[in-house]
Image: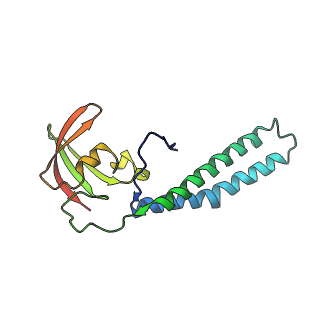
Amino acid sequence: MRRHNKNSPPASPYITPEGHKRLSEELSHLWKVKRPKVTQAVAEAAAMGDRSENAEYIYGKKQLREIDSRMRFLQRRLNELTVVDRVPDDTSKVFFGAWVEIEDNDGTIYRYRIVGRDEINPGKNYISIDSPMAKALLQRTEGDEVTVKRPIGTSTFVVISVGY
């Protein structure tokens, strides 16, 4: 779970339809499945008597606080988000939701999809629209050279393809 850092810029309000569906399903699962199970477990633990030394009760209450916190976050975030469910007019340029193939100076090819902060997934090569790489790629077209400041130094890439 990500905590809000007061010094960081606000998260972009964009999300893909798939990402919005995933967050909505998580909220629904927490509300309809997980919370009722934990509530039942807490009620059963409370029925055992002394709550001050009842580990099941104490742990269950902690779980409920975490579930409620996550649900509040998801409800607030889902209300803030803008679902981007259409392809841009100019599909030759990199915009939100694009799959972009780039090549570095060594000839290594990377493929990324530009998504919202709530959808970052390194395993699927989903990068945040707020990341330095995505910011450098936005509005670029095939053949453009892109320079990206990274923790290991500055790197140069060439855009090979853009798709949606």
User: In terms of image quadrants, where is residue 154?
Assistant: top left
Looking at the picture, does residue 145 appear above or below residue 34? Answer: above
Taking the spot 39% from the left edge, 48% from the top edge, the residue there is 121
Give the image's coloring scheme: rainbow
Taking the spot 25% from the left edge, 37% from the top edge, the residue there is 149
Judged left or right of residue 115, residue 143 is left
Depth check, front residue: 86 or 102: 86
Work out which residue is located at the far right of the displayed protein and give it.
49
User: In terms of image quadrants, where is residue 161?
Assistant: bottom left
Looking at the picture, does residue 112 appear above or below residue 108? Answer: below
In percent of width and height, residue 87 lies at 28, 67
Total number of numbered labels?
0
Judged left or right of residue 80, residue 157 is left
Quadrant assignment for the C terminus = bottom left
Taking the spot 73% from the left edge, 53% from the top edge, the residue there is 39
In percent of width and height, residue 89 lies at 23, 69
Judged left or right of residue 65, residue 139 is left
Work out which residue is located at the far top of the displayed protein and give it.
152
In percent of width and height, residue 118 lies at 44, 52
Depth check, front residue: 70 or 76: 76
In percent of width and height, residue 123 lies at 37, 46
